[in-house]
């Protein structure tokens, strides 16, 4: 039985539109063929979300072909056929002899494919920035006639402006993230182990809402006293108690797209300092969102936030956010004062105002939003408050 | 208030033992200083498990110093102080200006640290294999007097043989993985959405057992018909039904260490083909474990399995497993016929016999085990059966 196509996150026209934009840039840079190796870029151009990217794989975009080809480890080809919009004949499994082999790997299959298809002596785009040193060396050695061009930024930057279809999916994810915080309101209690609270909230993020489940587990952080000023721990083995502050930052996922959300919880009365910071942060959030409109820069958002909290007597060292989409953070636009990226409609950002002020004092407040024709549309429906238990 | 040390996964002596082994290899290769950048190697040498490695960071091991230093993004320094065994003064936060910056990043802070400490004109070990091309270029450009040596394999291969303390932690993780399969026995039913089943099992993996929670969420795969022959999808949005086969592969985590486990579930009567493959796979598992003892090779284990299933009339294309430990797969020894790694006591492997035979027919059976003085000790307590619902 041939593998059926699974439910597709997007219609074929959406993928062809994305590919057209990539091909326009390929033409401009005189590239005949592009090897896409960044997992989130492969998702963007094909719908593939299976977690096979820990071994080499490559989506091959040719100027002359409407659909790309995918060179992937053979055991992962069935999931590619199920998930990708392209014809099953264009998914090519490479043999297992290239896995766990110190001399050869899947990139040998990719370069062999280019050579066998007469594509190895043209302009070849490669996403070099995140590629291991020796993989680039391999492509150079196996395709000496090719002109290799670093194409890292092309697909990654194209992802910056979402289509309405992508926005709809990110809103589905945002509704799930909201449900996660609402579940936290039920389970954050003195005497509860952090892990037990995390288990309940993560389960909610997987079950989803409105008949739409989460399609993956994303990054999840439950940072409770004394770790309330750390951003990247998961949870500890401790039991929550009266006086515990709990900072959440997590994402919910639909078809690879993440909406992220952060909120601060307090078991017991918030300290005067926490209240003051909260007041400043909420004012900063409002000020930041108020300046958002097409034509201003990411830097302008950061300036609005930073100048607001300064009036409340504190600062924030880390940046105020970044472009968000497939697999959470997109390594393109940053919400920081020096970033000159000009906002356009349907850019989406994680406005991450979490503030790790002292080693033992931090605060969490973040929201995912899109730039509209006239302002900002925030995806969460939750209030901006310290959730006091 | 200074950040307290959190509960340590291992005593200081354990980390110093690991560091001694690294330093012996540094001496052999005439390296004064080693920059450890692979996240799992940083965990191994320090206890750090926070998920900050998506921006550059480096653990600096100097021959002349007992403890390493850690150069990390400033907001992550508190979690490093909490988790790492080293003195808090040896954890150095780099400024936020190096994040989301197209010209500079945390590796600039690492090379500046080496230069400022007179270490930039000596032999410098670097884990080059998985490092992006341009990061290696940066180290070369910023430390022109240094002799850079690729040290990727040193720490990674040292992890191959576990201490008794590591084995104890992996057994704690294995008990949690067992609980995950037992939870699956309760929730895999016709009419249940795959996502709802996944939510219950993942929550179990977080809650843990015996008072010991999971400390992270690891890879999780619920691959149900028609995806029962795919290894790396998460779960689909479908509802399970009479005739659904469900293949699980997931891991449970304690302090970064993963024990992995796979089992096959069937809603309704297994087909004759599935029964026959199951019989062969179980016989293969027994044959593989029966040959394990110090002195034989990884290849011998694979041969025992492959020759057994051949008698049952089928084969397996993918390798039969790999070394397992921190962050699941260790990129060192493979259980495949060509691998000549000689077994030694306390090596740990994921004997992964999952077999994706046809596009629409697969089977899951795997176990994590350690090599003992005389044989194999399997970590799971679960039977090797098709769980029929």
Image (spheres, coloured by chain):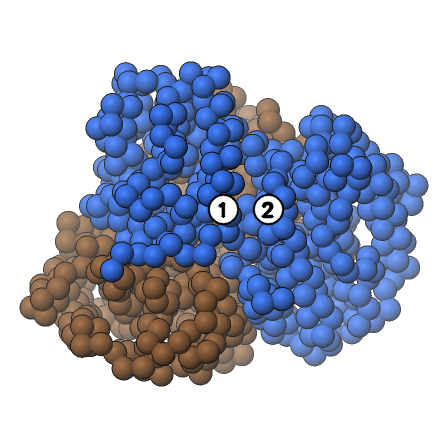
Chain colours: A brown, B blue
Q: Is residue A13 visible?
A: no
Q: Is mark 1 on a helix, strand or loop?
A: loop
Establish if B318 lies above or below A209: above
Q: Mark 2 belongs to which subunit?
A: B
Q: What element carries label 2?
A: helix
**Disc 1 residue crowd, few under 14, some 14–19, many 20+, Cα 10 Å:** few
Establish if A60 lies above or below B134: below
> What label sits on residue B165 in the rendered view?
2
What x and y, as percent, mark residue A45?
46, 51
| Residue A301: quadrant of the picture | bottom left
What x and y, as percent, mark residue B222?
65, 62
Q: From the viewer's perspective, tell me whether residue B86 is left or right of residue A214.
A: left
**Disc 2 residue crowd, few under 14, some 14–19, many 20+, Cα 10 Å:** few
Q: From the viewer's perspective, tell me whether residue A347 is left or right of residue A296.
A: right
Establish if B147 lies above or below B46: above
Q: Name the residue under label 1.
A: B11
Q: From the viewer's perspective, tell me whether residue B40 is left or right of residue B112.
A: right
Residue drawn at (62%, 56%) of the image = B173
> What label sits on residue A291 in the rendered view?
none
Q: Can residue B77 be seen in this view?
A: yes
What x and y, as percent, mark residue A208?
50, 74
Cα distance, mark 2 to mark 1? 9 Å
């Amino acid at each position: 039985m041939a593998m059926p196509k699974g439910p597709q996150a997007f219609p074929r026209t959406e993928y062809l539109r994305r590919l057209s934009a990539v091909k326009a840039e390929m033409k401009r840079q005189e590239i005949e063929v592009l090897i896409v190796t960044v997992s989130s870029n492969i998702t963007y151009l094909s719908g593939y979300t299976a977690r096979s990217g820990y071994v080499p794989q490559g989506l091959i975009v040719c100027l002359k072909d409407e659909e790309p080809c995918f060179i992937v480890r053979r055991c992962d080809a069935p999931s590619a056929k199920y998930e990708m919009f392209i014809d099953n004949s264009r998914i090519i499994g490479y043999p297992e002899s290239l896995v766990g082999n110190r001399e050869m790997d899947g990139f040998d299959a990719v370069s062999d494919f280019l050579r066998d298809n007469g594509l190895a002596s043209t302009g070849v785009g490669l996403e070099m920035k995140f590629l291991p040193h020796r993989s680039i060396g391999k492509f150079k050695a196996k395709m000496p006639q090719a002109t290799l061009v670093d194409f890292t930024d092309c697909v990654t930057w194209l992802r910056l402006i979402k289509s309405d279809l992508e926005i709809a999916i990110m809103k589905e994810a945002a509704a799930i993230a909201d449900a996660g915080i609402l579940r936290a309101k039920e389970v954050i209690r003195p005497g509860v182990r952090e892990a037990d609270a995390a288990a309940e909230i993560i389960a909610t993020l997987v079950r989803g809402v409105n008949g739409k489940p989460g399609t993956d587990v994303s990054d999840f952080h439950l940072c409770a006293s004394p770790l309330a000023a750390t951003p990247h721990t998961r949870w500890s083995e401790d039991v929550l108690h009266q006086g515990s502050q709990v900072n959440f930052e997590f994402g919910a996922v639909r078809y690879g797209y993440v909406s992220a959300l952060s909120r601060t919880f307090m078991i017991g009365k918030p300290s005067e300092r926490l209240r003051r910071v909260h007041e400043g942060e909420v004012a900063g959030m409002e000020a930041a969102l108020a300046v958002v409109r097409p034509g201003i820069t990411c830097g302008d958002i950061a300036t609005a936030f930073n100048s607001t909290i300064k009036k409340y007597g504190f600062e924030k060292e880390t940046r105020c956010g970044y472009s968000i989409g497939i697999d959470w953070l997109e390594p393109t636009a940053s919400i920081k004062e020096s970033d000159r990226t000009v906002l356009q409609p349907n850019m989406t950002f994680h406005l991450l105002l979490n503030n790790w002020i002292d080693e033992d004092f931090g605060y969490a407040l973040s929201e995912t939003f899109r730039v509209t024709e006239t302002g900002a549309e925030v995806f969460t429906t939750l209030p901006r408050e310290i959730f006091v238990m």
